């Protein structure tokens, strides 16, 4: 790479060339549909597309370098149409409209990319030609029109504060204006929402990579607040043990939408690379090297960041610039990424590695007093178990108890390789009202009693209480996880649901007619993928009083919703009498 990239002995040319090639490919893919869809783009993807084009058109190593004019490969018209769309969507307040109307934080996502594009243009060695000068002028106008509303505006979620501050910090650097720095200081004075173990309050890898960590980096760099980098360091350190060889990072403990998905680890790359080079940290460098072996996330934006951040361009500690990153299959996890045990106490999640297996125990669901709502950790998966390519993604416990939903631990405790999870549920039958509470008109207070709402004045009635206590002890070591499940209280049906990642074969189970699911009714079952397998069981006899089904609870089913996991499902069913022991174990390849 030549031109814009500062040439020093430590520049990682192999990394930059790979990012540049991927950026070109992504822009080429955008151009193939650009004319047909640009008029319907929301403001964030419109600006993301424009940023990608500005990045490659100003990058000397790119096939698009200098492609400012119309004709084959020309970017003038595509860039202009993105600018037209952005100016159309910028409302009279200066903010962008979207799902959240005239939203400062949603506008901040777009304005941060605007500032990044302007930073690239202002960093050119020579003054921009008329085409790029027009891009600069129109983007500068967008910043100017947005500034007052961004200073005055509010937010919805914890991470919005830092995205807003990042945009304000970069806008202030490009177009200084009184009041911006003061507003940033007000938001920061609330304190960064970082839990004791390094997670942010939303406990989300999605928002850690897309919002909070990049925002804190931008604020630190743009407004001279290097102390904010300590939060980034702590968060990246906390995530180190939670990466998986399949290229994902654990997210079951998140309070946001990524608690329901397999989250790709690739967006962590620029964060670990930046801090590995700035701090000279071997563990961060090892994480960055592993992440480089994955498909690159938003390569054009990564290239733009590398153009403006010298730390991203340097060769990682312990690697010469000419080496590049080895394929991910050739990289072993650094010791910090694969400890025998790891815990995020504030998230109620624990991980154990041994004998080629990884067991993850989760007992950190939030209390559901307000119901199942956005912003809470409610995933009922309490165990994951992997042996190579054989992955048991979700172990859940469903019980037929007043439609209150699956097991979610209310109390979680870890000792060594053992984690105990417990929950106690109560449901009431309501007796007649006392005489002094009766009304002649028969109209009583509308109340929600925990399961449903009705005009029954529940709080004034005597009750008959039914309860069900569930305790699950998980012992993980020696390539296996042993589950002791015990019940106390109501005698009812339970179903232990095991969900495997598709792609393997099942043995020892019987199909549940027409459902695509299976049941283990005796002995041990096995799920194998290639040479890797997980043995599980023992099964329990099937019967009409022990249905093999998962019940997400009335709060979902009333709205025709579900939180069901996707994959190959096996059920073990029984009654809530006494205790049951189940074992998950890795099957050696020779077996």
Image: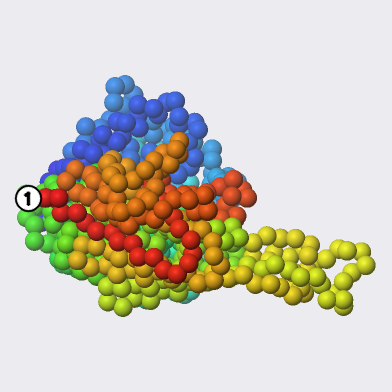
Q: Please tell me in which quadrant of the rendered image residue 317 appears.
A: bottom left
Which residue is pictured at 52% across the width and 49% down the height? 544
Which residue is pictured at 33% across the width and 57% down the height? 538
Which residue is pictured at 53% across the width and 53% down the height? 545
Q: Is residue 266 above or below residue 576?
A: above
Q: Is residue 132 left or right of residue 387?
A: right
**Nearer to the camera, 258 or 286:** 258
Secondary structure found at label 1? loop
Q: Is residue 181 left or right of residue 370?
A: left
Q: How is the image coloured?
A: rainbow
Measured from the top left, where is residue 61 in percent x and y?
Answer: 18, 38
Q: Is residue 136 left or right of residue 310?
A: right
Q: Is residue 49 left or right of residue 425?
A: left
Q: Please tell me in which quadrant of the rendered image residue 80 appears.
A: top left
Residue at the spot of label 1: 323
Which residue is pictured at 89% across the width and 69% down the height? 439
**Nearer to the camera, 438 or 302:** 438
Outermost top residue:
71
């Amino acid at each position: 790479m030549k031109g814009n990239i500062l040439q020093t002995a430590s520049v990682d040319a192999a990394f930059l060339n790979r990012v540049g090639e991927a950026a070109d490919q992504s822009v080429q893919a955008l151009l193939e549909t650009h004319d047909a869809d640009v008029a319907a783009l929301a403001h964030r993807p419109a600006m993301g597309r424009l940023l990608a084009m500005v990045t490659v058109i100003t990058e000397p190593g790119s096939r698009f370098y200098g492609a400012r004019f119309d004709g084959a490969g020309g970017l003038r018209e595509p860039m202009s149409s993105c600018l037209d769309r952005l100016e159309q969507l910028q409302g009279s307040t200066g903010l962008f409209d979207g799902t959240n109307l005239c939203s400062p934080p949603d506008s901040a996502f777009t304005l941060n990319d605007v500032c990044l594009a302007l930073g690239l243009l202002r960093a050119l060695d020579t003054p921009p030609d008329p085409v790029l000068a027009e891009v600069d002028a129109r983007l500068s106008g967008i910043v100017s029109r947005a500034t007052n509303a961004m200073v005055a505006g509010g937010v919805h979620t914890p991470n919005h504060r830092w995205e807003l501050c990042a945009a304000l910090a970069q806008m202030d650097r490009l177009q200084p204006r009184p009041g911006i720095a003061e507003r940033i200081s007000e938001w920061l004075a609330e304190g960064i929402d970082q839990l004791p173990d390094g997670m942010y309050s939303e406990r989300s890898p999605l928002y850690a990579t897309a919002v909070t960590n990049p925002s804190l980096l931008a604020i630190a760099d743009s407004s001279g607040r290097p102390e904010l980098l300590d939060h980034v360091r702590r968060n990246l350190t906390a995530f180190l043990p939670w990466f998986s060889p399949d290229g994902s990072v654990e997210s079951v403990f998140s309070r946001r939408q990524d608690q329901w998905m397999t989250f790709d680890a690739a967006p962590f790359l620029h964060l670990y690379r930046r801090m590995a080079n700035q701090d000279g940290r071997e563990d961060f460098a090892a994480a960055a090297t592993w992440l480089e072996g994955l498909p690159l996330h938003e390569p054009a934006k990564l290239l733009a960041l590398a153009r403006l951040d010298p730390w991203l361009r340097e060769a990682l500690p312990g690697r010469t610039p000419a080496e590049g990153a080895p394929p991910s299959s050739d990289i072993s996890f650094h010791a910090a990424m694969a400890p025998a045990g790891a815990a995020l106490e504030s998230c109620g999640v624990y991980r154990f590695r041994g004998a080629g297996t990884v067991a993850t125990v989760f007992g950190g669901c939030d209390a559901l007093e307000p119901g199942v709502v956005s912003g809470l950790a409610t995933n009922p998966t309490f165990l994951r178990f992997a042996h190579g390519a054989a992955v048991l993604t979700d172990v859940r416990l469903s019980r037929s108890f007043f439609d209150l939903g699956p097991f979610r631990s209310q109390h979680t405790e870890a000792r060594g390789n053992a984690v105990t999870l417990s929950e106690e549920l109560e449901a009431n039958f309501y007796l007649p009202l006392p005489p002094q509470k009766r009304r002649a008109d028969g109209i009583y207070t509308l109340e929600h009693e925990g399961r449903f709402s009705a005009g029954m004045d529940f709080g004034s009635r005597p009750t008959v209480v039914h309860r069900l206590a569930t305790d699950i002890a998980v012992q993980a070591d020696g390539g296996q996880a042993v589950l002791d499940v015990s019940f106390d209280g109501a005698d009812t049906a339970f179903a232990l649901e095991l969900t495997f990642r598709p792609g393997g074969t099942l043995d020892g189970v019987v199909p549940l007619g027409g459902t695509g699911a299976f049941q283990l009714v005796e002995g041990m079952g096995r799920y194998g993928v290639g040479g890797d397998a997980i043995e599980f069981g023992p099964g329990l006899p099937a019967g009409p009083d022990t249905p093999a089904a998962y019940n997400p609870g009335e709060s979902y089913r009333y709205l025709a919703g579900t939180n069901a996991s996707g994959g190959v499902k096996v059920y073990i069913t029984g009654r809530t009498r006494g205790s049951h022991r189940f074992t998950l174990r890795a099957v050696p390849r020779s077996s």
